Every structure is written in C-alpha cells, then in structure tokens.
Image (spheres, grey):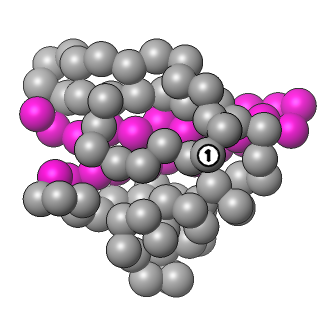
Amino acid sequence: MPDVAIYPGAKVISNGENSGIIGANLEVMAPRQDVINFYVKDLGLGADAANGGPLKGKKNGHDITVIVTDAGGGKTAVSITEPK
C-alpha cells in the first residue's frame, strides 16, 4: 500500500506493485469533495490544491499522487500511487 492515510470507511478494491509503482484503488460512499479535502489535508497541500485535479505531495519522504473521481451511485473512487 502507498504510504498515505486511507479515507475512513473506504474499501480497498486493489493494491500492489507494477513497474516500480506502488498503488491502491479505493471506493467509498462519500462526496467527492470531502474525499479531496481529506487528502489535501493528509498530504499537507494548500487549499488551492482542492480544485479536483491530481493531488501531488510528499508523505514521509514519499512522492504521492492521489486521483479522486466520481464512481456513480454516490460512490467516490480513489487511486493512490507512489514510486517504489
């Protein structure tokens, strides 16, 4: 799993390593903006980072990218990656 917090109540759909990238895909019943705000705070990013694009930051010295998208049906999908 990438070195980042998991949104409370999120279900891990998949995780693993591929071509030197560690990644995880999550799904959660929560508004997309709430999830974005959670990761903006977790990664220590400024409020301007919450515009919906990929969130890029460092956590414990690791480069982290978080992509948050609408999964339909009230669900939000989260993709988290970090280079190994």
Near mark 1 (Cα within 10 A), the count class, few <14, some 14-19 or many ≥20, is: few
- Position of residue 8 relative to residue 57, above or below, is above
Hey, which quadrant is residue 11 in on the image?
top right
Furthest toward the front, the residue is 8
- Position of residue 31 relative to residue 9, above or below, is below
Q: Residue at x 46, y 16 (%)?
A: 14
Q: Position of residue 66 (x, y in %)?
A: 43, 49
Q: Is residue 64 left or right of residue 41?
A: left
What span is colored magenta in the figure? 62-84
Q: Residue at x 33, y 60 (%)?
A: 56
Q: Position of residue 21 (x, y in %)?
A: 20, 29
**Residue 12: within the magenta?**
no
Q: Is residue 43 left or right of residue 79?
A: left
Q: Which residue is mark 1?
A: 8
Q: Is residue 73 left or right of residue 69?
A: right
Q: Is residue 47 left or right of residue 17?
A: right
Hey, which quadrant is residue 33 in on the image?
bottom right
Prevailing secondary structure class for the magenta stretch in the rendered image: strand
Furthest toward the bottom, the residue is 47
Q: Look at label 1 and name its amino acid.
A: Pro
**Residue 83: within the magenta?**
yes
Hey, which quadrant is residue 16 in on the image?
top left
Q: Residue at x 40, y 39 (%)?
A: 80
Pick the front one: 32 or 1:
1
Task: Decide if residue 58 is in sight here.
Answer: yes
Position of the N terminus by quadrant: top left
